[in-house]
Structures are given as C-alpha cells and as structure tokens.
Image (cartoon, rainbow, N blue to C red):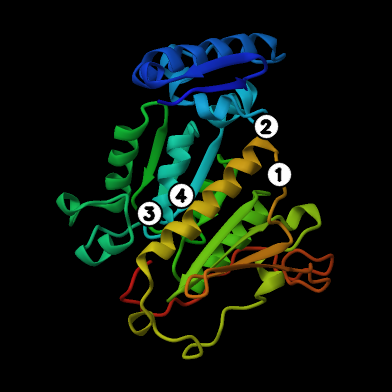
Amino acid sequence: MIHLVEPLFEGYIIYCNEFALRRRRTGYRRLINRYIKDRNKKEEGLEMDFSEEQIERYSRHIILPEVGGKGQEKLLNAKVFILGAGGLGSPALMYLAAAGVGTIGVADADVVDLSNLQRQIIHNNSRIGQAKVESAKQTINEMNPDVKVNAINERLTVDNIQEVLRDYDVVLDGSDNFPTRFLMNDAAYFENKPLISGSMFRFEGQVATFKGNEGLPCYRCLYPEPPPKGMVPSCGEAGVLGALAGVIGVLQAVEAIKEILGVGDSLAGYLMLFDSLKMSFRKVRVMKDPECALCSPTATIKELTAYEEAVCELRF
C-alpha cells in the first residue's frame, strides 16, 4: 500500500493510496482542473477562456509557473513554420502540435517512401505514395483538433519563400541539403524571423538558433558559403541513425516553444552538438562574423540567391 502526502499546486494537497490511485482518472484530474481555473483567474491579461477539454489536454503545461494560462494562450496563438516533413520535421511537428501551437505550416514536395519510415515517424505504412505534407496534416489533425495545419506541397524557392515565411512567428529548418539551408537562413533574416536549424549525419546531430537581426550570429556567420561539390560525402553513402532524428527534431521543438513563451536560455549564439555513440552533448559558442556577407554592417547580400543542389537519393 502506498501512502503519500505532499504539498502540491500552492496549497492543494493530494492523498494517494491504493484507492486514490484507482481513482486517478477522476479525482486527480478534477483537482488539477480546479487548480488551473483558480490560477487562471489570478493571471492578468488572460484573454482566452479555456474549455474543459483544453484545461485537461494542456494541464501539465499550465501548472508550470513558467507557462501558466498566459503561456498556453501564447502557444495557441502562435504560428510556426517547418521546412521539411521528414526525419527532423516529423518529431518537431508532432511535439509542437501536442503542445498546442495554434497554426503550423509545413512545406515539403516529396511523397512518403518505405525507406522514410525508419526515422520519419509522422508517417506510416498505409501512406506510402501520399504527399508528406498531407500525411503530416492527417497525423496532426488526429492528434490535436486545436491546431490548424497549412500544408504546402511544393518546393520553396527564391520566388516564394519570403512570402511563405512572412506570416509566421518562428521558423524551423529540417531540410537535408546546403542550398536549401542557405536559402532558408537568408529568407528568415530578410523577414526578421528567428530560425531554429537542425541537422544530422550518421550518428551525430546539431541544433542552433539564429537571430542575425538581433546582433547575434546568422547561419552564414557559422558557414559563410555552401561547401564545394564533392567535399561532403554523398547522401547515399552516409546513412543516419533513425532515432537520432527524434533527438534533434525534439530539441528544435523545445527551442521553438521557448521562443514563443520567452523563457529560458536561447541557443542563439551557440551550437549544440550531440554524439549518439558517445551519448554526449556539447555546446560551443558561435561568434557573430563582423564581415558576414548577410548580417554585418558591410553586408553584400541584398537579395536571395539560389545555389545548385546536389543530387541526393537519401532524404532526412
């Protein structure tokens, strides 16, 4: 038998024994909902009237002092764009949707392939051949009806990317090639959007947040130009650990949620490196390049540039 008495939620007390554990789905839930309602009444500036279903769905967020009703309201009103519904985009999309981000845009021109399912968890076997953005939208709609999904089944180019990003608060890059990464960085900079970039290779991954408009580094401060052809091993030869995509994609989602809430320490100005074989994280400082071609006072890049994309058979 378990007897547990502990203070919870600023004075609320829960007594847990075998009977209480059996009643968890009713009594504990009601207690949380009561606490949330009382707390929301105390929060000034809260405009949203949460339904009973929303209170229960987001209860573990709302009881966090750093989130609360105001924070959940911010999430429900937020707009996040993700480039790519693949390995990195899949977990990021799912956790942002579960968190209650109100509007999620996703762009991908690819279709679901059997080889994707080793890491692209937003898709399943029955959707092979279906457009990835439609598959992702279906999964999100089934997960959380609060979320509006803008599915863009086309490639983003110099001609359309700025218009797409303009309506969003935060943008995530889950692309799998350098030309697209540079295009995404430049467009985010010109549209003054925080960019959360993730990438992975074999057993290693990295995450960074770029805010070149705020006196912090942009992607070009770290990588001034795309690497020459042949310098980076071909995608078909590389391979990637499937579960690694989950780690990196979830870190991108966490960064996006923090940006929306305005809490914690941003990765802006840092690069988070993860080695899955050593199971180690390392955060290194990224300095702003005083001669960056994009975000420095002497910048020479004034408009978007299209780089030639190498042929790649392995999609992240």
- From this viewpoint, is residue 112 visible? yes
Residue topped by disc 1: 264
The nearer-to-camera label among 4 and 3 is 4
Residue at the spot 33% in from the left edge and 81% down from the top edge? 236
Q: CA distance from mark 2 to mark 3?
A: 29 Å
Whichever of labels 2 and 1 marks the residue nearer the N terminus, that label is: 2
Q: CA distance from mark 2 to mark 4?
A: 21 Å
Dot label at residue 66: 2
Evaluate if marks 2 and 1 touch, with contact meaning CB atoms under 8 Å apart: yes
Whichever of labels 4 and 3 marks the residue nearer the N terminus, that label is: 3
Quick check: 157 above or below 80? below
The type of residue carrying mark 4 is Ala
Instruction: Answer with the quarter of the image where residue 206 lies.
Output: bottom right
Between 23 and 250, the residue placed more toward the observer is 23
The type of residue carrying mark 1 is Gly
Q: CA distance from mark 1 to mark 4?
A: 19 Å
The nearer-to-camera label among 3 and 1 is 1
The nearer-to-camera label among 2 and 3 is 2
The type of residue carrying mark 3 is Ala
Residue topped by disc 4: 92
Q: Residues within 10 Å of mark 3 (few under 14, many from 20)?
A: many
Q: Residues within 10 Å of mark 1 (few under 14, many from 20)?
A: few
